[in-house]
Image (cartoon, rainbow, N blue to C red):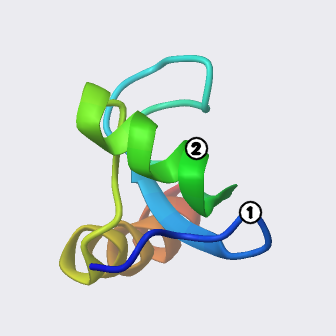
């Protein structure tokens, strides 16, 4: 992976309630911040993690 630039953003799934949001939020972070947050275990930028959250969110809204 090449070194990210400041202008790039990365879509991430929040893994736990933290400064980045609530568990299972999908957020965008500047690439350098996303890389640091992922290394610290706060977020996951893997496409499967994001897809899993996006698939379950509409279901939760329908049952509410």
* Lower position in the chain sequence, tag 1 or tag 2: 1
Residue 57 location (% of width, % of height): 47, 66
The residue that disc 2 covers is 33
Residue 30: quadrant of the picture: bottom right
Q: Residue 1 or 60: which is nearer the viewer?
A: 1
Q: Which residue is mark 1?
A: 6
Graded by Cα atoms within 10 Å as few (under 14), some (14 to 19) or many (20 or more), the crowding at tag 2 reads some
Residue pushed farthest right? Answer: 7
Q: Which residue is located at x 26 percent, y 37 percent?
A: 39
Which residue is located at x 51 percent, y 17 percent?
18
Relative height, residue 59 to residue 37 (above, below): below
Foreground: 46 or 17?
Answer: 46
Could one spot residue 60 in this view of the protein?
Answer: yes
**Quadrant in which the N terminus is drawn:** bottom left
Q: CA distance from mark 1 to mark 2?
A: 9 Å
Mark 1 Cα within 10 Å, few/some/many (few <14, many 20+)?
few
Q: Quadrant of residue 31?
A: bottom right
Residue 2 position, x and y percent, is 36, 79
**Based on the displayed image, in which of its 4 quarters is residue 29 positioned?**
bottom right
Residue drawn where x is 46% and y is 60% of the image: 12
Q: Is residue 22 above or below residue 7?
A: above
Element under label 1? loop
Q: What is the x, y in percent for residue 56?
A: 34, 70
Extreme residue toward the front, this view: 3
């Amino acid at each position: 992976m090449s070194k990210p630039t400041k202008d790039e953003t990365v879509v991430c799934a929040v893994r736990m309630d933290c400064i980045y949001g609530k568990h299972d939020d999908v957020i965008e972070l500047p690439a350098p911040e996303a890389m640091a947050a992922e290394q610290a275990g706060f977020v996951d930028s893997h496409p499967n993690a994001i897809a899993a959250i996006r698939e379950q969110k509409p279901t939760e809204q329908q049952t509410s």
